[in-house]
Image (tube, rainbow, N blue to C red):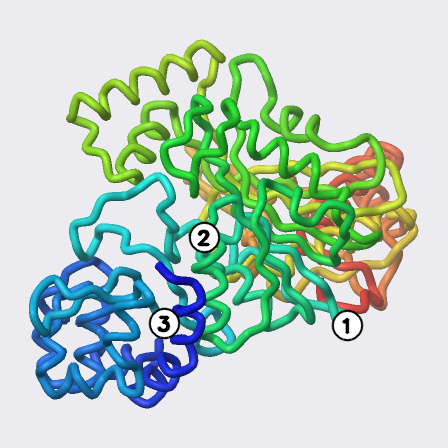
Amino acid sequence: MDESALLRLAPPLREAFERVGFTADGILAALGTEVHDALGRGEPTPVRRRCRTLGDLGALVRLFLLADDVDVDVEAARTALAPVDPDDAERAGLLERPSGSVVRTLLDVRPLDLGDGNRWVVSDIDGSTREVAIGADHVLGVGHASLSLVRATPTRTDGPVTLLDLGTGCGVQAVHACTYAARVTATDLSARAVVLARVTAALNDLEVEVVAGPWFDPVSGRRFDRIVANPPFVVGTGDVTHSYRDSGLDLDGASRVVVSTAPDHLELGGTATLLAAWIHVDGEDWRSRVASWLPDHGVDAWIVQRDVADPALHVGTWLRDGGLDPRTPAADALAERWLARLEDADVTGVGFGFVYLRRTDRPTAVLAEDLRHGLEDPLGDEALDVFDRLDWLRTHDVAEERYAVHPATAYEDVALPDPEGGWSTVVRRVHRGDGPAWQHEIDADGAAVLAGLRADGLPLADVVELLAAARGVDSDDLMPGAVALVSALVVHGLVRPAGSPRPH
């Protein structure tokens, strides 16, 4: 792979792609929904059948998305790459000739829409299309983790921002960041990843500074408005078999390094969005474990756990990810070491999720919570809203403020048949119909308090006074619960303070 030659190849390759319609929308329109879904499932036969009628576009789909051998003497294949010379592509390391006029790709070149129009991402072939070995320096393409990070990254800005993409891999986060950041810097330990990230940026005609080195070393002494990171966070033994997932650090050491160091590279008010994993240890609260990685001063943190895997599932998943069949002796030996290390550390599970950080000049504050249910809306800017809401709660007397229930908040009363007739309520809850879709169980008093909240109405303390009078109880008995409920609902966006600048 020749970096200089690949970079020179980027402009004519982009010209070919645009001319033929090798874009996310163009491929979907040409294949149709059903065949496009088959492509996503890794079922090549329906795609090959459709490509027979697609001329130049069909040739590029077969070449780059199916990793098929393509005869460039066939007219569609010969014209599809124009103005790229196949010989130049071969010298650059994009294509090879296994025989005669037949060419095959050595790299995965994939169009996708990250929410702001078409982009192309260059990575190594992952084996789902053509049987290939997953080497130690394999550069992963766009997968579930990278797309979930795209959806979870805040893009709202109040002006030009600088951004660091730590552990860029194929460059997908950096490319996405170019839509909202004025200057993007990307780093990676892998020399191969650095090359492919630069090629990805060039193919999209984007300016990204890509530098090589471990962790934050390449940007020592520098600070950024935003940091995004999909580091090699896999909880393991400290062995490195695949650089995109293995850090060389024991257990959750990689996540600890990134979470603890990222604040040092943020400007005041700057935010970081980090993919991370942490172990669940028997007798230890996972929230306390992750919070302990943070300094005592200068950080707001929102830690969101999206999933937890038992040790066997965790190991089996990553064995398959590395192209190993768990039934083989080599995989069995690796799994034995891996599971033994987790057992020695009393690991009961492996948590996975997002860590959002904001640099402040106050004592560190941490909110850590589970968010394991399905979400329809991107998490993204919700993190900025959570930080704003926490700031509001720090600076206001909750009891003396007015509130409005967010329009997307629904109230649910679940009742079961009463043995004596009618219905008996067993649970009341409010849930938010957008964003993270939070749910909170409440009691009858909580439901009554929420029913009395209006932006142009009474402060919370007065609402509680009226409820206490109606119930024939002392308002001091109701106030702590009402304040705690409204505070929690403000954090999660189900209730908003009157006059809030945004409908948080």
Residue at left 70%, top 38%? 261
- Spatial CA distance of label 2 from label 3 is 18 Å
Which quadrant, please, contains the N terminus? bottom left
Which quadrant, please, contains the C terminus? bottom right
Residue 28, percent from left and from top: 28, 77
| Front of the two marks 1 and 2 | 2
Q: Residue under circle 3?
A: 111
Residue 277, percent from left and from top: 52, 34
Q: Dot 2: what SS?
A: helix
For marks 3 and 1, the one nearer the N-term is 3
- Spatial CA distance of label 1 from label 2 is 30 Å
Figure label count: 3
Q: Residue under circle 1?
A: 159
Residue 115, percent from left and from top: 49, 72
Q: Indicate left or right for 248 with 438 as reference.
A: left
Residue 65 can be seen in this image = yes
Amino acid under label 3?
A: Pro
Q: Residue under circle 2?
A: 193
Q: Dot 1: what SS?
A: loop
Question: Relative to 178, does residue 283 appear above or below in the rendering?
Answer: above
